[in-house]
Amino acid sequence: MDRSLYVEFARRSLGGEELDGASCQRILSDASLDILSLLDAAYEVRKTYFGQEVRVHILNNAQNGHCQEDCHYCAQAKSSKADIEEYGIKSDEEMLQEGRQAYAKGASCYCMVFAGRGASQSRIERLKRVLSAIKTEFPDKEICVSTGFVSNEGAVELKKAGLDRLNHNLNTSEAHYPNICTTHTFADRLNTLLAAKAAGLRVCSGMIVGMGENHADIIDVARRLRALKAESIPVNLLVPIEGNALSPQESGLTPDFILRVLCLFRFLNPSSEIRVAAGREMHLRSMEVMALYPANSLFLQGYLNAKGVSNTRTLQMIKDAGFSIKSEVDLDELLGRQESQQDAITNGSKALLKTIKELRPSIQ
C-alpha cells in the first residue's frame, strides 16, 4: 500500500486533528494496512513527544480484597472466586518503604492501589499522611493513587497533600459497561475523572481490551480519553484469572491486533503517556518489544493479583531495543543491581543446599 496513508495518520495526529471513525476502524481491522508501517507512523508521533524514553511504573497493592463491587474482570470483586490473599490497608511505613523500593528500581511513578468502592474520609486522611511522608523524602518523584470513586472535595484534599495523578480507568465504553459491572456505572467513573481534573490532578485512565467489546467500544474509549486530555493511559489486556466472573479461555487477542490498538491510542492521544500494561507478556509474546514503538510506558514486576516477568528481562528488553528510561538511575546500573541481587539469591540457595547436604547424615 502507498506509504502516504501512514504518513497522513502521523501528520494528522501531530497536527492535533482527531482521526475520523472510518480511519480508526481501518487501523483496527483492515488487514491490508501493514502493521510495521502502522508502527512506524505511530513511532513518529511517540518520538516527537517522548523521544527514546520509556517511563517505568511500579504498582503497590496497598489493600487486597474486601471489595463489594462486582467488576467481572477483577480477582478482588465480590463476584470472584479467585484464590487471593486478602488483607487490609498496609501500614504507613510499609507504603513508604515500598515507594522507596520502587524509585530505587527505576520507577518514575509509584502507584498505590486500594480495593473498595471509594475513598472514605478516613481513607483520605490516611492517604494524606502517606503522601506527605513520600513527598517529604522524594519531592520530585511522581505518585499515582487508585482508590475508587473520589468526590470533588476529596480530590482537592489529595491534591493539596501532594498527589500528582489519580488513576481511575474507564475500562470499556459506556455502551459495553453494563456487561462488565452492575454495581456502578460508566458515569460514576467519568465523574471521578472530572473531579480529579477540576482539582488540578493529572488523570491516569485507560481500558481493558479483551472483555467482549467490539471495535467501536475501543474507539469510543480512546476518544473519551482524548476529550478528557488524560495525561496517562494504561492499555490493559485481559488476564484470565481462574474464579473471575469474566475469565474467557480465549479472548481473541493477537499480537497484531494489540499493536493496532496501541497505534490507535497513540494517534488519538499523541502527547499522552501510553502504557502497555497488564497482560503484555501473555498476549504479545515474542512481539512484546514492538509495543514500545507506539507506547512509551510500562509496568515493572507485576499487576496486583497477576505476576509479570522478571525486572531484569523487562529492563534488558528496553535496552536491547535502543530505548532509555526516565530515571535518575542509569539503565545499565539498574541491570547491574538486578544481576547482583540474582547472584545473591543464587549463592544463598547454593549455600542452603550445601548446608542441608552436610546435615543430612546427622538428620538420618
Image (cartoon, grey):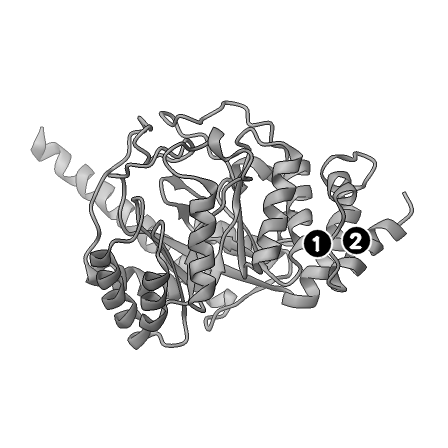
Q: Position of residue 284 (x, y in %)?
A: 59, 39
Q: Is residue 33 above or below residue 267?
A: above
* Local crowd size for mark 1, using a 10 Å CA cut-off: few (<14), some (14–19), many (≥20): many
Q: Is residue 45 above or below residue 221?
A: below
Q: Is residue 309 left or right of residue 270?
A: left
Q: Spatial distance from mark 2 to mark 1, Cα to Cα?
A: 7 Å
* Amino acid type, callout 2: Phe
Residue 218's image quarter?
Answer: top right
Q: Which mark is residue 153?
A: none
* Amino acid type, callout 1: Phe
Q: Is residue 213 above or below residue 304?
A: above
Q: Quadrant of the N terminus?
A: top right
Q: Which residue is mark 2?
A: 9
* Of the pair 124 and 359, the residue shown nearer to us: 124
- Looking at the rendered structure, the number of numbered marks drawn on it comes to 2
Q: Which mark is residue 267?
A: 1
The residue at the far right in this view is 2
Q: Residue, x 63% and y 32% (percent of image)? A: 214
Residue 11's image quarter?
Answer: bottom right
Q: Position of residue 300 (x, y in %)?
A: 45, 53
Q: Position of residue 184 (x, y in %)?
A: 39, 38
* Of the pair 358 and 37, the residue shown nearer to us: 37
* Of the pair 329 and 210, the residue shown nearer to us: 210
Q: Verify CB contact (< 8 Å) between mark 2 and mark 1.
A: yes
Asked if residue 287 can be seen in this view, the reply is no
* Of the pair 2 and 344, the residue shown nearer to us: 2
Q: Residue, x 68% and y 53% (percent of image)? A: 268
Q: Secondary structure at mark 2?
A: helix
